[in-house]
Image (cartoon, coloured by chain):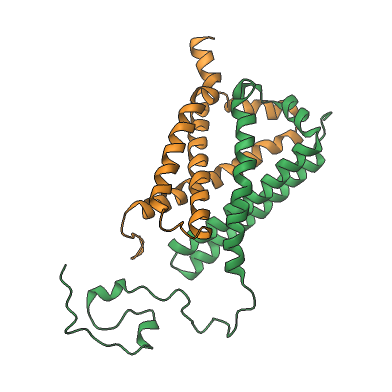
Amino acid sequence: MPAGTLYRGREGMWSWVAHRVTGVLIFFFLFAHVLDTALVRVSPESYDTVIQTYKTPLVNLMEYGLVAAILFHALNGLRVVAVDFWSKGPKYQKQMLWTVVGVWVVLMAGSFYGILQHTLIAWFGK
Amino acid sequence: MSTEYSDAIVVPSKQAHTGKGLGTGNPADAFVIEPPRQRTKKTPRRTRTNFEMLAWLFMRLSGVVLVVLILGHLLIMLVFDGGVSKIGFAFVAGRWASPFWQGWDLLMLWLAMLHGANGMRQVINDYAEKDSTRLWLKGLMGTATVFTVLLGTLVIFTFDPNI
């Protein structure tokens, strides 16, 4: 790693690291997602075949992971906007980060069944 | 860590901007952080636009819009109405029959790709130290971005439910 990449190592730095990591992950997924959607221009069968992989338990779990990354990036992104545009933003950045983490935990718990219902119903029935 | 200022070395301001540290022979020199706007021989005398400020502003504005577009997209696709199980060609055809959802997806595609591409540009600039590596990575990433945005746009505009 280039010198000067690690900075102090507190909430501000780690939220920045997490924002980068989730951002890069989401960007790579986006390429794959546009390509798989483009199959609707090939044939309904080829699209449906590829979409079937999104319904397997492992990929269904990865969708929950994708939502985890997107939710953190979205909530922390709003915090970054607040830090940049709200006069008291920098003062409360730490409290805002813990708010982000709290809301993230609630939303992840709340969407657990919704996102994984396809797998849960297949395994355990209605 | 003790801080001693008594034998601090005064460096002429020119020397601190050469990219070679302070040149004092002290290993800690390597950790001197260069000013972000350090001028090199290749730097134009005057920058014509405020590109970096506009990019910074775009990240914030597109970010706020994307929160709404993407969280809505995720709820519809992954949570409502049976979650991922309902998705298929027929479901896509039903949604893209409406110009509203076509517009939603088109805006989401463009904003997300440009937001992601600018984020990757920052990451590449931060970690790739060699000029040629930076150039190649950004060229590759830019090409892939243009290709993907154009492909996605073409798919939305030319979608045919009776294919």
Task: Identify which residue is drawn at 73% across, 30% down.
Answer: B92
**Vertical side of A58 occupied by B2: above or below:** below
Query: Would residue A24 be seen by someone viewing this image from the given angle?
Result: no
**Residue A2, image x, y percentages:** 36, 64
Camera-nearest residue between B139 and B30: B30
Q: Position of residue A110 (x, y in %)?
A: 49, 27
Q: Indicate left or right for A81 with B96 as reference.
A: left
Question: Which quarter of the image is occupied by the C terminus of chain B?
Answer: top right
Classify residue B43 as left or right of residue B89. Answer: left
- Is there any visible trace of residue A96 in the rendered image? yes
Q: Residue at x 62, y 65 (%)?
A: B54
Decide: is B110 above or below A41: below
Name the outermost residue toward the front: A88
Picture quadrant of residue A91 = bottom left
Direction from residue B65 to residue B151 in the image, left or right? right
The chain in green: B
Which residue is more in the foreground, A46 or B151? B151
Colour given to chain A in the rendered image: orange
